[in-house]
Structures are given as C-alpha cells and as structure tokens.
Image (cartoon, rainbow, N blue to C red):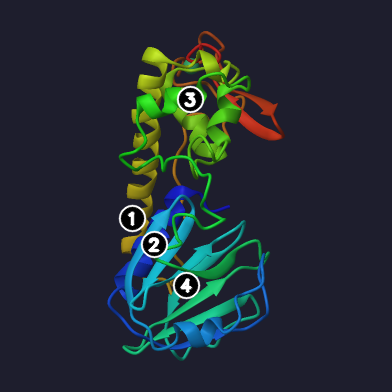
Amino acid sequence: MPELPEVETTCRGLAAVLEGRRLSHVEVRRPNMRIPFPKGLAGRMTGRAITRIARQAKYICMHLDDGQVALAHLGMSGRMAITQPTTAPGKHDHVVFDTEDGTRVLFNDPRRFGLLTLTTEEDLENHKLLARMGSDPLGNGFNAEVLSAALKGKGTTIKAALLDQRVVAGLGNIYVCEALFRAGISPRRKASSVSGKRSDRLVPVIKDVLTEAIAAGGSTLRDYAQPSGELGYFKFSWNVYGREGEPCSCDPDGKDGIVVKRIVQAGRSTFFCSRCQR
Ligand SMILES: [Zn+2]
C-alpha cells in the first residue's frame, strides 16, 4: 500500500513532467474507481494547464489553471506511470493524461481502492475527503504542542492514536512502528500519557523517518528510467517493521536475547522492542 513517502515521491515525479504543462487529452476508461468519476471529468480537465502538484496527507492535488483541483488517492494498489503517448493503456490503467509536449501519465490501480475526483481551489480545504483531518506530519502545523493537545484525554494506545487520521494525517502503520521505536515509546502506552518530553521526542522522529523514506524514494526516482516509468514504490530498511524475532539494534550480537516482538493492535501488526521502548 502506498504510504505518505510514496505519495510524496509520486507527487514530485508527476510535478517534474506535468507542472506548467497543458493537458491535450484526458481519457477516463471506466465509470468509477472507489467512487464514481465526476460527470464530464475528462472534458473538464482537457485543455487545462496544471499549475501545481502538491500532496495533502495521502492525496495528490493537481491544481489546474481555471481554479479546479483534481484530487487523486492511490488507495491500496494505485500508481502513476510516466510513459510515451504511444503506450497503449492496459486493463488496469483507468485514467490517461496526455500533455501537449508528449508525455502520457497512466493512473493504474488493479484493486480500484484509489480515486480521482474534482473540486476547486476554494473548496479544497473543506472537501469531505480532507475535512476533519489532523495536521500533515511534515507540515509546520505539526509540532509537539499540537500533538500533545491531540493526545490529551485519549484512552487508546499511542499506536492507535497515531494511526487516527484526526490526530495526524496520513501516517501509516510502518511509520508509526518506526517512529515509536526511535522515540523509545512503547506502542502499548496510553496515548494520554505521551506528553511533555515524550511528545517532544516523538514529533522530530516522525518527521525524520518520513523525510528519510522520501529521500530513499527520491534516489530510486532519479533512476526511474525503467520502461514502466512507475513512480512511488521503493524499498527502505526498517529498524523494527517486519523484523519479528530478529535481534534488536540494542543487542546486535544477540547476547541478551533481545529480539523484535510482534503484537496485533486493532487488527494491525505492531513491531517493537520491549527493552528500547517504554
Ligand atoms: Zn532494543
């Protein structure tokens, strides 16, 4: 599933080929993805120039020169591929964007949990898909004060709270596990007890782990010369995520028998070290 860093690198890849370009042809190849495409979507985008591509939480916002904003989400399996106008769209390429300078972008999504809809610059902030979302973890609005206020009085675990989009927008399971490890906070700790020094520690490590993943994605992006031109998926090495039973970095030789543990919280796997995280 594309997480925030993959969405960010997808935005950057798209910006490189779409910003400042005019869409000469847009084609919608089925009536819906997770939700129906708006009526006349292709016609409303064709002929418009893309002024800016920006990420908001896990949404890709394509700002058009007439004040419309195309809002895309990659869902579980969506991806954007940059190709040539001669590339025929395949079965799972649901939307085709062609620019007048000869780039074709295909929005591919086999499972169709992704979406593409239209709104306006004016309505973007209050759009039902984005309203009620907490701060973007990489935005200036996300700081220790905001986080501890959001956690105050929360009866859930810190793990569940950080996955709650109303607390912080777009932080996925992998990044929550890694950030809690780096901050030395147990995923089982009550959210309301994460305040003061603990919430001060958490904010910078959340930003760091996302920024490092984006940098890793950016470096794979630089050589995306592969024919598929697919954006956004890359490998990154984790401290705890997916490492159940492996020695923790606090016990590299395994002398103390300290290994990464996996538990299930609210149906999601949590990986952590019970010595490093309290
Ligand atoms: Zn450890």
Look at the picture and state if 182 lies above or below 213. above
For label 4, count other residues whose C-alpha is less than 10 Å away and answer few (under 14), some (14-19) or many (20+).
many
- Residue 22 image offset from top left, x and y in percent: 34, 84
On residue 81, which mark appears? 4
Q: Quadrant of residue 76?
A: bottom right
Q: Nearer the viewer, mark 2 or mark 1?
A: 2
Sequence-first tag of 2 and 3: 2
Sequence-first tag of 2 and 4: 2
- Residue 37 image offset from top left, x and y in percent: 61, 75
Label 3: which residue?
180
Q: Nearer the viewer, mark 2 or mark 4?
A: 2
Q: Is residue 238 left or right of residue 274?
A: left
Viewer can see residue 224: no
Look at the picture and state if 273 lies above or below 100. above
Label 2: which residue?
11
Residue at 37% in and 73% down: 67
Viewer can see residue 41: yes
- Residue 249 image offset from top left, x and y in percent: 44, 21
